[in-house]
Image (cartoon, rainbow, N blue to C red):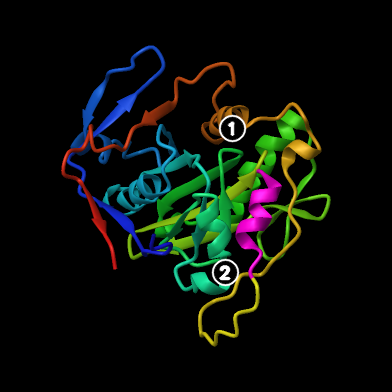
Amino acid sequence: MNIFRNSYLLLRYHQVKITRLGNMNSYYPVSIIATRSIADDVSKKLVFISKSNNIFENLALEDWFYKNFDFENQSLLFMWVNTPCVVIGRHQNPWLEVNLKNLSQNSVLLSRRNSGGGTVYHDQGNLNCSFFTSRARYNRKYNLETICGSIRSHWNLDLTISPKEDILLNSYKVSGTASKLGHRNAYHHCTLLVDVDPSLLHQMLNVHELGIQSNSTPSVRSPTLNLKACCPEISVDEVIHILGCYYIKNSPLCFQGFDFVTPSEENFPGNFVIIIT
């Protein structure tokens, strides 16, 4: 098995299947979704939640939003959760960042994202948040404050933002951050450690010195902590709900402002292209 294939997915979406609670079979063309904006309301906010747990599908969908959405008069929070995987930054060397032997033995996927930053481990106890805006309205600090404010308002956890723009709890890192800025659009995405398996996290990222010389960007390793360690009742599903409602300023009693998106070959035949190098 070739552990690191530098595989990624490209989407050429012509239509997106959207499901809402109470309306599970709605079908909207991309031409409608991608241009759904209000000219006189630059604060129009959308919340999309992926129904996929596949890292390649979710990164591909994130990239599609970045390349195809019009964020001039709207912004988007895209939330997604993956099965176990390791994601390295755009300018990183996997042999210096990941324990490839442990990766293979545990059947953990490896992917490279389009943004910079360091290496992260994902599983279903980790929430990924991608904040999309126009380049002109890009504001990473606002996004981090949105996450901290939503968690603080519901669970009274004292989250703080470090000078490096990580989110900390009791001086431990609970969220890393990275971004991609283009000519028109921009996104800032981050992880949120809610209930990640700490044993697998350390196994995947505990790399032995291999004597490799490289100009790649190294990760800055920090001690981490799950939110659940300080708040046993918290869960990823609840964080998705509370953060989504906080973002669009809706009542946390309903999901009316959320769209559930399914990126799959069944819904988008021929639109997933796997490139292996």
In 3D space, how far apart are the residues under numbered discs 1 and 2 (Cα atoms)?
A: 35 Å
Q: Check residue 206 for magenta coloring.
A: yes
Amino acid type assigned to the residue bearing label 1 in the image: Tyr
Q: For residue 43, what is the image quadrant?
A: top left
- At x 61%, y 39%, the residue is 125
Q: Is residue 186 left or right of residue 275?
A: right
Amino acid type assigned to the residue bearing label 2 in the image: Glu
Task: Mark 1: give few (<14), some (14-19) or many (20+) Cα within 10 Å.
Answer: some
The image's mark for residue 74 is: none
The N terminus is located in which quarter? bottom left
Boundaries of the magenta span: 197-207
Task: Mark 2: give few (<14), some (14-19) or many (20+) Cα within 10 Å.
Answer: many
Question: Residue 146 location in percent, x, y?
Answer: 61, 43
Judged from the image, the secondary structure of the residue bearing numbered disc 2 is: helix
Count of marks, rendered view:
2
Q: Residue furthest right?
A: 170
Question: Residue 110 location in percent, x, y?
Answer: 46, 57
Question: Camera-side residue: 56 or 102?
Answer: 102
Q: Which residue is mark 1?
A: 246
- At x 70%, y 48%, the residue is 198
Q: Main secondary structure of the magenta part?
A: helix
- Above or below, comparing residue 162 to residue 83 in the picture: below
Q: Could you tell which of marks 1 and 2 lies nearer the N-terminus?
A: 2
The C terminus is located in which quarter? bottom left
The image's mark for residue 97 is: 2
Residue 34 in sight here: yes
Q: For residue 117, what is the image quadrant?
A: bottom right
- Above or below, comparing residue 12 to residue 3 in the picture: above
